[in-house]
Amino acid sequence: MRLLTVLGGQIWRDDRKTFWKAIRWRGMKRGMRRYKKFPMISTWSSLLNSTSTQLPTLLLSAFFSSSVVGFYSIAFRLLSMPMSLIGASIGQVFFQRAAAAKLQGNLSSIVEDTMQRLLLIGFLPMLLITLIGKDIFSVFLGEEWSEAGVYAQILGSWLLLDFISSPISTLNSILGKQEIDLFFNIVIIICRILSLVIGGMFENEYLALSLYSVSGTFLWTLLTIWFIKLSKANLLRIIFDIMLPLSNCFIILFIIIVCKWFLYFNSLILVFLSCLLLLSYYTFDYFCLTKINLICKRIQKG
């Protein structure tokens, strides 16, 4: 801090005339008018988003025991942490590419490519969590945390849609639609409050989390459709281009369902089998998409 103060003083002493000459007040006014939505709208939107993230813990603690809050917290953290890290990395790259694509006129292709990658990464893990979350938590954390796995099963569909939509949510900022972000965050915080309060009034934590998950899934689905429409992307193309690798998900899910509910595999074997199938899925997707990209490049070259 002291070094910064000294350097700042030297710059002001030696170059303040150059500094003042470089300022263009008209340019600053134009910039303030052009980007006024960021301080006026985006700030409130971010505040509402942060508040809604903390709501479950606050409202669950108001209606239910501390064990319910603890199970929810561990389920949410373990599921959201890796998804947030991956989503944030993809989101940063997407923002840079989308901002450039807007000027070049090929924004739709960037959105389609990003959504395809997000679907391929997140679809199968979240569906596996939804099917065998209790088994996964009991194997890795112990039987006493199996209830957190049940909560994870309930939250799986919402977290999947959140994972797909969050990285591309910067589209609203890129295209100057920050008011949509604000409106969405107002609606979702109202729905979350109602979901948790209704579940609390009935003294049923499963009902509270189910309503919370269903409302979140529905709203994030609508937001995803909005992003596709806003960018003029093609939903059918997004699905069709990854139909082959994505179809493997349903084969894997069928195997897991048979092993769990018809062959009655124990949790350890079921989780081990799921890990092997998940690894094979990502391996196949990698080589399959690589081959598809090579074919597309050859076709484009003629």
Image: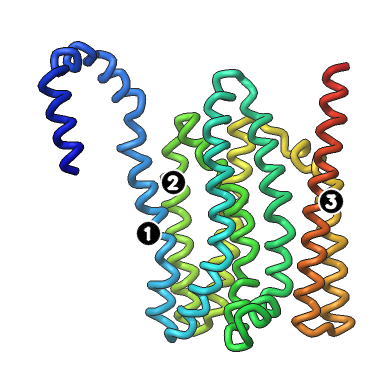
Q: Quadrant of residue 59?
A: bottom left
Give the residue type that dot 1 points to. Answer: Thr
Q: Residue at x 19, y 11 (%)?
A: 21
Residue in the foreground of this view, choosing between 191 and 255: 255
Q: Specify whether 113 is left or right of 302.
A: left
Q: CA distance from mark 3 to mark 1?
A: 40 Å
In the rendered view, tell whether residue 291 sits above or below residue 166. above
Label 2 neighbour load within 10 Å: few <14, some 14-19, many 20+: few
Q: Earlier in the sequence, mark 3 or mark 1?
A: 1
Which circle's residue, 3 or 2, is located before the other in the chain? 2
Judged from the image, the secondary structure of the residue bearing numbered disc 2 is helix
How is the model colour-coded?
rainbow
**Dot 3, crowdedness within 10 Å: few (<14), some or many (≥20)?**
some
Amino acid type at mark 2:
Phe
Q: Secondary structure at mark 1?
A: helix
215 w.r.t. 17: above or below: below
Residue 99 vertical position relative to residue 39 in the rendered view, above or below: above
Say what secondary structure mark 3 lies in: helix
Tell me the quarter of the image containing the N terminus.
top left
Q: What residue is drawn where x is 49% and y is 82%?
A: 68
Compare residues 229 and 273 and report the one nearer the observer. Answer: 273
Residue situated furthest left in the rendering: 13
User: What residue did someone put label 2 on?
Assistant: 183
Q: Which mark is residue 5?
A: none
Residue marked by disc 1: 51
174 up-or-down from 151: above or below: above
Check disc 3 and give the amino acid type: Phe
The quadrant of the rendering that contains the C terminus is: top right
Residue designated by label 3: 284
Question: Where does the image place residue 189, in percent across and percent down from the top left?
Answer: 43, 58
Q: Residues within 10 Å of mark 1 (few under 14, many from 20)?
A: few
